Structure formats: C-alpha cells, structure tokens
C-alpha cells in the first residue's frame, strides 16, 4: 500500500488537517515548506473570489501539493460551486466530508486530482473505495472537532486489512511516537489538527491559544449542542453551564423525518457561528474546539517547529 508522501511527492506522510475557521494560507505554506502537506476547508473563505485568491497565493509561495476540504452534504449550499472552482484551478487533492463523495470523485479523477474521503467506520470506507477514492482519512475517537466513535488502535488495522487503498489516521497525534504507532498499524500517513491550533500562524484569539496550554486531555468533552454531531470541545466554565446534551430542537429533529434536514442545517449553522465568535474574540461564551492532543501543547510556536516534533527533525 503506497504511503501518502510517495503518492503526493512530499517528504513526510503528514497532513496538517483542514480546520474549520482556522486553516489559512500561512499555515498551508508553512506545512508544505516544512516537508508535509496542508489542507484548508473551502468554507473558510466566504466568497468564490476569496477562495480563488487563497489558492493562487499558496501556489505563488510553494510548489508543493496542498489540499482543500469540501463538505459535500446539505449543510454546505456552496458545495457545487466550490467543487467547480477546485476543478478549474486543479488543486492537487480534495478531502471530502459529511456526505457522498461520488460527484467529487467522478469529476476530479479524470483531471488527475486525488480524492481522500473522511470515514469513521469500515462500511463507509468500503463504499468510498468502490466509488474510486484514492485514500480514506480514518477519523477516530481521538480526533478534535468532529470525531468518530472508534479508537485508532481498532479502526486503523481493521481498515488496512480490508481496503486496497491507503488509510490515513486522523486523531490523537501530537508527537513522533504517535506517528510511528499509526504507521506500525499499517496507516499510510497521519492527519493532524489540534496541536497546530497553537501555531503562531493560526489566526485564533490569544485566549483560545492560552486555553490549549492551560487545559489538558481530561478537559476535553463531547458535545452535540453545536453542530448536531459529536464535537470535541474544551470543557470551559461556559460549556459546563450550557451542558453538552442534545437540545430540544435536536430531539425534535430526531423524531420528525421531514423536519430533520432543516433543523440539522439550522443547528449546524447556528453552532458554527458561535464557535466562530469564540475563536476570534474575547467572549465569556467560549466554545473552543480541540482534541485530547492538547495534553501535549505547552507553548505557542511557529508551525514548522511543531511539525519537527512529528518528524523528529531538528
């Protein structure tokens, strides 16, 4: 099974993961120039013009491959337009999330654009492999933000045993030993997010970065209040005060099939707006996404320095 660094022609089998609201041009360039690769969510750019400008700026500053994460379900009304832009500009790879990747795979593959698909279990991984995905990103229960239900030590070997395409492990990677462990299970690479929140280049507030240092793994909790799906957040006093259980709206959505799609979209948009406010402003309503890997965040450093902890390069 080929490794992702061989597939992409980069030095290290590491993706600096696409992080909603956070990933920016500076982070992608630093990841690529550090011998890894980076991806950003298309939704981090409000307009098509901003998305195009970001892709062109990355291309002007590095000749290494980078990727764009595309949410392909109903919560992203811009998906079709964003896809056509990514195809037109021939981004090196697309990471699909939260829906069927069929349209993306069918359109991207003839252009030589690779498609990696987020998966959380074997059934879905087999489906996207059959559709023609180039690799799967196995989102496990150690991931920050939207996480899967299965531990990496179970999920990765299970997928590796059954799939013919590469399996990239996403979740719980903070240092070189974690990378080595994932590769020993048969992973073709790792996708890493949480520790890069503390990068100098990350545009989040100083309070958010300080929280990554001050809080540890024991302070990470799962909430369904923000997006309707399981989201890992830091258990700040505000999160404790609002609780982490499903709201009345979500319970209603689960009982009413017709309403479900619309309520889920509303909850997702409303929750993500709150996460956005928390990320960039000093506010008592702090909802800060992070995974258990914050245990290993001790300072704010340039992204390339953090990357060196994963590669063992000094």
Image (spheres, grey):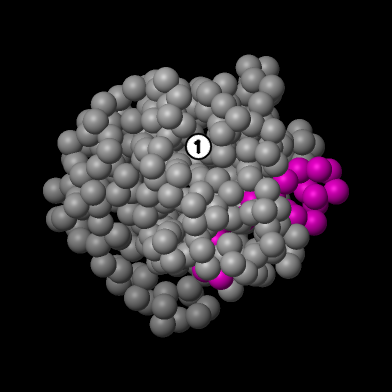
On the picture, is 264 further left or further right than 160?
left
Task: Please provide percent x and percent y for residue 294.
Answer: 28, 41
Task: Please provide percent x and percent y for residue 225.
Answer: 32, 61
**What residue is shown with label 1?**
16
On the picture, is 276 further left or further right than 3?
left
Question: Which residue is rendered at x = 37% and y = 49% of the image?
Answer: 172
Can residue 145 be seen from the camera position used here? no
Question: Which residue is rendered at x = 53% and y = 68% of the image?
Answer: 158
Magenta residues span 104-122
Q: Secondary structure at mark 1?
A: strand
On the picture, is 89 further left or further right than 250?
right
Of the pair 75 and 23, the residue shown nearer to us? 23
Can residue 197 be seen from the camera position used here? yes
Task: Please provide percent x and percent y for residue 269.
Answer: 44, 53
Q: Reply above or below: 70 against 262.
A: above
Callout 1: 10 Å neighbours few (<14), some, many (20+)?
many
């Amino acid at each position: 099974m080929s490794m992702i660094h061989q597939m992409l022609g980069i030095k290290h089998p590491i993706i600096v993961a696409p992080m909603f609201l956070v990933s920016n041009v500076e982070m992608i360039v630093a990841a690529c120039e550090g011998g890894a690769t980076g991806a950003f969510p298309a939704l981090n750019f409000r307009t098509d013009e901003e998305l195009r400008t970001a892709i062109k700026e990355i291309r002007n500053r590095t000749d290494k491959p980078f990727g764009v994460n595309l949410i392909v379900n109903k919560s992203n009304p811009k998906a079709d337009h964003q896809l056509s832009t990514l195809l037109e500009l021939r981004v090196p790879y697309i990471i699909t999330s939260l829906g069927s990747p069929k349209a993306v795979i069918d359109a991207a593959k003839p252009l030589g654009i690779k498609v990696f698909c987020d998966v959380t279990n074997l059934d879905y991984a087999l489906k996207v492999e059959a559709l023609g995905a180039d690799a799967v990103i196995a989102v496990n229960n150690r991931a920050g933000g939207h996480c899967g239900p299965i531990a990496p030590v179970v999920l990765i070997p299970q997928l590796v045993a059954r799939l013919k395409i590469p399996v990239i492990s996403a979740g719980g990677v903070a240092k070189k030993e974690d990378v080595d462990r994932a590769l020993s299970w048969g992973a073709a690479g790792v996708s890493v997010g949480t520790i890069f929140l503390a990068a100098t280049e990350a545009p989040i507030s100083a309070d958010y970065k300080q929280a990554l240092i001050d809080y540890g793994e024991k302070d990470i909790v799962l909430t369904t209040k923000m997006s309707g799906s399981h989201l890992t957040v830091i258990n700040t006093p505000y999160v404790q005060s609002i609780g982490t259980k499903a709201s009345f709206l979500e319970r209603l959505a689960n009982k009413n099939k017709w309403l479900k799609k619309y309520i889920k979209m509303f909850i997702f948009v409303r929750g993500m707006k709150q996460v956005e406010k928390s990320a960039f402003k000093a506010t008592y309503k702090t909802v800060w996404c992070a995974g258990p890997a914050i245990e290993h965040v001790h300072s704010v450093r340039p992204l390339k320095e953090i990357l060196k902890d994963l590669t063992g390069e000094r």
